[in-house]
Amino acid sequence: MPGFKGATDCGSDLGREEGSLRCGFRSTAERGTTGASRHWKLLWLLPAAAALACGGDHGPPPSVRLFIRGQILSADPTPAAIPRATVALYHFQGFLGNPQIAARTTADHVGHYELQYTFTSICEPSDQPGYWIEASAEGYETRSTFTFENQYSDPPIYCTSAPQMINLTLQPFGVLRVITSTSGSGLDPDGYTLLFEGTLGYLLELNDDQLLPPLRPGQYSLELTEVSGNCSVTGENPRTVTVAARDTTVSTFEVSCVS
């Protein structure tokens, strides 16, 4: 049909020459000038084709929103809530890096806490992403769920956005107060050294009154050393003392000297 170039023209020799642009064909000259650009376009399309072959472009890794809650209790025969305890979520920054705080909160007046932290990961819900919790409060021993055996949390923290419940118990401390009382003549001005558990030494003056660092409840050995030969300690030396939770144990060393 004159004046109309449709599918029939595109399929004929004439259509290939006259309607090359409209029908999608290129002449030999045109193919020579545009061949390089077409090759670059093909190279640009390769990554997209590879992505489609592997299931398509899924975008950034999915996000995991850790939501951990629980209660901080005392490690007593009858556990009691610990108000205002500090609870922190930790993880390692990089391979063999230092522990970093991911989230931190303060427990309420009955010891309840909530921690939330979001990160990107392709881990499975049954995996452990390497986070752990640490809780601390004045008068109590700091408690961490990190275990050196497997480098994970115990109880475990899983890679899931579902709520997780972790309750922690903190051991209450006791206090040990050590007093020295020296009398007589020929006193040694250098004072004494107190051996705690046979090794750790504390310097004490002739007449002193010191509080040792907070201790877990239990029995401990004390020995007053570097006592001059002309001096003697009244009572047992070394001696065993018992430290109770939330209580202060007093141990007095009375020393008598003669010149």
Image (cartoon, rainbow, N blue to C red):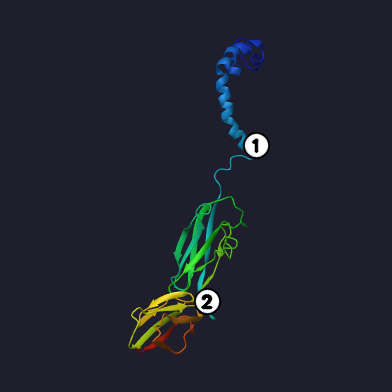
Could you tell me how far apart the alpha carbons at marks 1 and 2 are, in whole angstroms? 57 Å
| Residue under the point 45% across and 71% down | 137
Picture coordinates of residue 90 (x, y %)?
A: 50, 60
SS state under label 1: helix
Residue that badge 1 annotates: 53
Q: Foreground mark, 1 or 2?
A: 2
Residue 139: tell me if it is visible: no
Q: Is residue 50 above or below residue 196?
A: above
Q: Would you say 187 lies left or right of 123 here? A: left
| Residue under the point 51% across and 70% down | 71
SS state under label 2: loop
Q: Is 235 in front, or is 153?
A: 235
Q: Is residue 205 above or below residue 185?
A: above
Residue that badge 2 annotates: 75
Picture coordinates of residue 92 (x, y %)?
A: 51, 56
Picture coordinates of residue 191 (x, y %)?
A: 36, 79
Which amino acid lies under the numbered mark 1 shown in the image of this protein?
A: Ala
Q: How many numbered discs, if any? A: 2
Q: Would you say 254 lies left or right of 33 here? A: left
Sequence-wise first label, 1 or 2: 1
Mark 2 burial class by Cα count in 10 Å: few <14, some 14-19, many 20+: some
Say if mark 1 contacts mark 2, CB within 8 Å. Answer: no
Q: Quadrant of the N terminus?
A: top right
Q: Is 13 in front, or is 210?
A: 210
Picture coordinates of residue 258 (x, y %)?
A: 36, 89
